[in-house]
């Protein structure tokens, strides 16, 4: 019986994420016609996500959620609002730190360069923990405000009309500061990742408990609205954190100047030592930055020689990046030819982070996230409320499941979902590219020019070719004289992938990318456990007037549209403020004309769309597209994915209300007749 139960839970998670995974893989392999790299690792990571989600959600149902519900119901009975609000701060902070989606934000700085966006790099790499804690503090304050609102039965609208304009005004002001401008997207995306599978059920349970206690146990939908606050206040907290660190950040500069010796003092504000700066030059910079760092060609080429022949130096300079990946993605043509001329033997260096290391790192993070939150709830229940812990075996099993699930889930995100989104995102620009894209190059040394033969076309055009033998067989390759180094007798065989739709179909390619983004947003949102949980709650509280399926489809439609806007922002490097400012200016009147309860629910829907499935995929895709197009940052796409669902849900509510009024009026007219 237990085996059948576990099987049902695992099959349910497979069903939830199957569509989006198949969608991504099929799009890359069939439409983009590019095979998946590291397919086995990706499959293993996705498998971890499936089992992780199953364990994690089951653990929440058995352990944390019942505990949160009891505390939420009992707390208002025995304590005043001040104690409830203080508890809400700790609950919001703890649940946010425990969110699996936060792990995606931790690794989001992988493509940010320190010279283009020093403040963004500082927050993501140097002050990562401060960033997470500031987001958690924002959610904590939001929960406290939510408890006040529930306790005194206040409308959500004054909170919306206060917090959103402040966040928008602050964002507009920061957009005029060249250094701070880059963190606007991060701030609004931070608000999107706070409300997932941990925060939503706990905060909703407590909010509904306080709301019902305040309304003397009458059925109430007042539990809605706190998710909106938990999405909006972290935006403010991250913007304020960036402002507070403004004086500590070096200014934006060129790559050449950033790595120069005269700028070393300012560069060290972002790095622990010069070795870390050099690692940044090799893994994220170009030949320009690396030469500038050494300021001496002899030292520079000596380091390249060590990189090619010394495994220890390779590990120091490249970290988890493989040597082949560096050669194809970061090395210049000159560097590749030089390395080919000095390389003595193949390097047997394991690239990437071992799975055991990932599991160990995520285990530590899971323990730090789940245990304090559990202890907080137990402390309040046992010491303050003087209640006994019911079903102890079930509770401890639930906590164990939550821990195991979070470890597997966050590890799977790092090994599977994140890399999958990154791969697809990196290939998307091919759909609208006008030129062939460089993929890889291989050095043929020594090269025998006597094997080169010539051909002639009907118009008299001459070309040169040679036969190249590889593992897959022998093929004819065009000989490019510019790629032949006569001095070292080396030929660079450059592998390029042609534009997907040809050089003159750019508009069609962009439409294809936007269609992909819509499908990805729609499919990923349908799989979000937090949205499913909220949909069930909405249906129960409205006694079936609003169906769970209706909420799912309307919200998913909004996320799909939001992703389209987010991708357009990256493609054309549109400032995020140009998208979110008009969007929220549309939302404010929509909110005004909507009923208070529905407004609360609609704004909450925008907060629960971005969880453990959506965030890693969307964030990795956005950052990869931005990296391919040399956009300073790919943030802001999650902010758009959270904005549009609120608009679609509020619009759906107004249309539904208008339809109901017409039906009622028609019924009255018929009765009068």
Image (cartoon, rainbow, N blue to C red):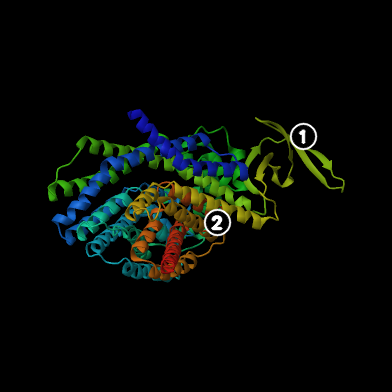
Residue 476 in percent (x, y) is at: 74, 36
Q: Secondary structure at mark 1?
A: helix
The residue at the point 31 percent across, 42 percent down is 366
Query: How would you rate the neighbour count of disc 1 (Cα within 10 Å): few for under 14, some for 14-19, many for 20 or more?
Result: few
Residue 330 left/right relative to 319:
right
Foreground of the two, 670 or 225: 670
Sequence-earlier tag: 1 or 2: 1
Q: Secondary structure at mark 2?
A: loop
The quarter of the rendered structure image containing the C terminus is bottom left
Locate residue 153: give its quadrant.
Answer: bottom left
Question: Between tags 1 and 2, which lies in front?
Answer: 2
From where the camera sits, is residue 278 visible? no
The residue at the point 66 percent across, 42 percent down is 495
Residue 20 in percent (x, y) is at: 50, 44
Write down the residue under mark 1: 451
Foreground of the two, 501 or 458: 501
Q: Which mark is residue 630?
A: 2
Residue 276 in percent (x, y) is at: 42, 49
Instruction: Tell me: residue 89, above or below residue 326.
Output: below
């Amino acid at each position: 019986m237990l085996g059948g139960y576990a099987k049902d839970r695992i099959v349910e998670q497979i069903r939830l994420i199957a569509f989006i995974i198949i969608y991504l893989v099929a799009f890359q392999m069939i439409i983009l016609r590019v095979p998946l790299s590291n397919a086995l690792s990706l499959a293993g990571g996705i498998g971890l996500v499936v089992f992780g989600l199953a364990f994690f959600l089951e653990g929440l149902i058995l352990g944390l959620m019942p505990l949160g519900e009891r505390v939420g119901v009992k707390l208002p009975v025995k304590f005043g609002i001040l104690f409830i609000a203080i508890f809400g701060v700790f609950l919001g902070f703890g649940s946010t730190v425990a969110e699996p989606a936060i792990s995606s934000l931790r690794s989001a700085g992988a493509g940010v360069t320190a010279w283009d966006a020093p403040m963004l790099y500082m927050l993501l790499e140097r002050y990562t923990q401060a960033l997470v804690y500031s987001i958690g503090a924002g959610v904590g304050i939001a929960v406290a405000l939510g408890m006040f609102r529930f306790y005194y039965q206040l409308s959500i609208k004054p909170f919306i009309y206060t917090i959103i304009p402040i966040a928008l005004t602050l964002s507009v002001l920061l957009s005029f500061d060249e250094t701070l401008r880059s963190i606007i997207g991060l701030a609004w995306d931070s608000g999107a990742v706070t409300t997932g599978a941990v925060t939503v059920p706990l905060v909703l349970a407590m909010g509904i408990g306080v709301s019902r206690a305040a309304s003397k146990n009458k059925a109430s939908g007042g539990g809605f609205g706190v998710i909106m606050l938990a999405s909006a206040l972290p935006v403010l907290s991250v913007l304020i954190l960036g402002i507070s660190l403004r004086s500590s950040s070096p200014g934006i500069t060129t790559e050449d100047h950033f790595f120069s010796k005269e700028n070393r003092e300012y560069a060290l504000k972002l790095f622990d030592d010069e070795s870390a700066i050099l690692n940044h030059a090799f893994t994220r910079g170009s030949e320009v930055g690396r030469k500038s760092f050494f300021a001496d060609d002899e030292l520079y080429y000596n380091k390249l020689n060590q990189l090619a022949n010394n495994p220890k130096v390779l590990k120091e300079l490249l970290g988890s990046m493989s040597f082949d990946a560096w050669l194809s993605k970061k090395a210049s043509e000159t560097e590749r030819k030089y390395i080919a001329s000095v390389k003595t033997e193949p390097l047997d260096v394991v690239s990437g982070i071992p799975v055991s290391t990932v599991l160990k790192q995520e285990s530590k993070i899971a323990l730090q996230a789940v245990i304090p939150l559990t202890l907080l709830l137990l402390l309040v229940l046992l010491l303050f409320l003087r209640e006994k812990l019911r079903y102890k075996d079930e509770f401890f099993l639930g906590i164990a499941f939550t821990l195991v699930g979070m470890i597997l889930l966050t590890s799977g995100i790092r090994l599977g979902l994140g890399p999958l989104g990154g791969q697809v995102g990196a290939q998307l620009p091919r759909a609208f590219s006008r030129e062939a894209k460089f993929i890889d190059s291989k050095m043929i040394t020594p090269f025998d020019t006597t094997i080169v033969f010539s051909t002639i076309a009907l118009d008299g055009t001459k070309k040169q070719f040679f036969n190249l033998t590889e593992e897959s067989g022998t093929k004819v390759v065009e000989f490019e004289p510019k790629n032949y180094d006569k001095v070292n007798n080396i030929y660079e065989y450059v592998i390029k992938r042609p534009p997907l739709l040809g050089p003159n179909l750019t508009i069609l390619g962009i439409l294809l990318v936007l269609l992909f983004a819509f499908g990805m947003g729609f499919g990923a949102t349908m799989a979000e456990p937090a949205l499913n949980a909220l949909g069930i709650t909405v249906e129960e509280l409205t006694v079936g007037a609003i169906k769970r399926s209706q909420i799912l489809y309307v919200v998913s439609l909004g996320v799909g549209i939001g992703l389209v806007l987010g991708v357009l922002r990256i493609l054309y490097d549109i400032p995020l403020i140009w998208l979110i400012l008009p969007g929220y200016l549309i939302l404010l009147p929509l909110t005004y004309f909507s009923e208070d309860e529905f407004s609360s629910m609609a704004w909450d829907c925008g907060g629960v769309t971005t969880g453990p499935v959506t965030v890693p995929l969307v964030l990795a895709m956005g950052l990869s597209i931005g990296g391919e197009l040399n956009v300073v940052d790919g943030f802001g796409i999650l902010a758009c994915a959270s904005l549009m669902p609120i608009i679609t849900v509020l619009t759906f509510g107004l249309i539904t209300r208008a339809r109901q009024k017409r039906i009622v009026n028609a019924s009255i007219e018929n009765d009068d007749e």
